[in-house]
């Protein structure tokens, strides 16, 4: 086929046009998911993760937030009690299993901490009722959006018929959002760093219930921001003095000269929901 014949072949030209219209290059840039998910577009994706939640929170007139962090495994007592009963049944079948015995022991320890679930729920309910009115959405509870203490805090706001926010994260062990977050205020992030920005941006306080690596990571993030002056003076409340005094020896850090003595003043302790709220309320009144 010579050049003239090729150009005049109607079917060939039609197929070529179809290929043009279906090619990635012809897609609008923001509709090209393959390109947007490429390594080269990481910066664009990061901008979107900054901009999307900010736009929605502005539209919803969220004036300020209170961060609640805590362990995903701390559940209400009835839930953990049932898990213990299930494992005890398995132990009857395999009485020599050290793995099952270890699991029961861990569940019993979690059961002893289940009161923190109730406290987080109560704290969130009190804060939400005190501060959210029809014309103002201040002191809105924000959590990581997952189970455990996060669920309890979102649930407290749900009990009070108030707004709460969930900042979920896309991780290998996929975490679904808990069902108590306000629809339209649950966000899914790919980047931990950008998620942290949205935790901190509007926060006027942070309350840390017992938790693991994730809770500790967020705690030290906020403490570092306070220490370096990158975050204004907000109450940083460790809920459950007995737990936290065992986990971290802040006094040793100061005694060793690794932090200044006055850095210890960043931290306050509470053992009840009312006590935690009073610390925040007094700070807001200043």
Image: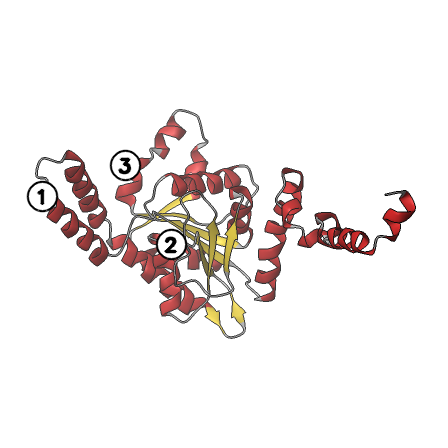
Where does the image place residue 75, in percent across and percent down from the top left? 28, 53
- Residue lying furthest right in this view? 4
Q: What whole-number distance in Å separates the C-alpha atoms at marks 3 and 2?
A: 22 Å
> Closest to the observer: 131 or 90?
90
Mark 1 or mark 2: whose residue is earlier in sequence = 1
Label 3 packing within 10 angstroms: few (<14), some (14-19), many (20+):
few
Task: Nearest to the eye among marks 1 and 3: give it.
Answer: 1
Q: Earlier in the sequence, mark 3 or mark 2?
A: 2
Q: CA distance from mark 1 to mark 2?
A: 35 Å
Scheme of image coloration: secondary structure
Percent position (x, y) of residue 67?
45, 53
Mark 2 and mark 1 in contact (Cβ < 8 Å)?
no
The residue under label 2 is 150
Q: Position of residue 7 (x, y in %)?
A: 88, 50
Q: Residue at x 38, y 54 (%)?
A: 150
Residue nearer the viewer, 190 or 157: 190
Q: Which mark is residue 246?
A: 3
Q: Which residue is mark 1?
A: 93
Element type at marker 2?
helix
Instruction: Establish if 161 lies above or below 104.
Output: below
């Amino acid at each position: 086929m010579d050049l003239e014949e090729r150009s005049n072949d109607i079917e060939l030209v039609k197929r070529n046009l179809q290929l043009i219209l279906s090619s990635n290059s012809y897609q609008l840039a923001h509709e090209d998911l393959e390109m947007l998910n490429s390594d080269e577009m990481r910066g664009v994706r990061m901008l979107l993760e900054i901009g999307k939640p900010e736009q929605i929170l502005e539209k919803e007139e969220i004036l300020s937030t209170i961060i609640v962090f805590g362990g995903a495994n701390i559940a209400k007592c009835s839930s953990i009690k049932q898990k213990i009963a299930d494992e005890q049944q398995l132990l009857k079948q395999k009485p020599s299993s050290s793995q099952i015995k270890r699991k029961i022991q861990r569940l019993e320890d979690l059961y002893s901490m289940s009161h923190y679930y109730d406290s987080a729920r109560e704290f969130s309910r009190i804060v939400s009722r005190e501060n959210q009115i029809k014309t103002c959405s201040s002191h809105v509870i924000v959590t990581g959006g997952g189970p455990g203490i996060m669920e309890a805090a979102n649930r407290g706001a749900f009990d009070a018929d108030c707004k709460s926010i969930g900042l979920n994260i896309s991780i290998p062990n996929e975490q679904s959002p808990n069902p108590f977050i306000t629809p339209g205020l649950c966000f899914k992030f790919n980047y931990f760093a950008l998620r942290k920005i949205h935790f901190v941006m509007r926060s006027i306080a942070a309350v840390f219930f017992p938790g693991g690596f994730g809770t500790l990571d967020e705690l030290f993030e906020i403490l570092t921001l306070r220490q370096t002056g990158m975050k204004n003076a907000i109450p940083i409340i460790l809920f459950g003095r007995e737990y936290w005094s065992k986990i971290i020896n802040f006094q040793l850090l100061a005694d060793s000269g690794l932090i200044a003595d006055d850095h210890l003043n960043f931290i306050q302790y509470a053992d009840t929901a009312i006590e935690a709220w009073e610390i925040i309320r007094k700070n807001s009144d200043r």
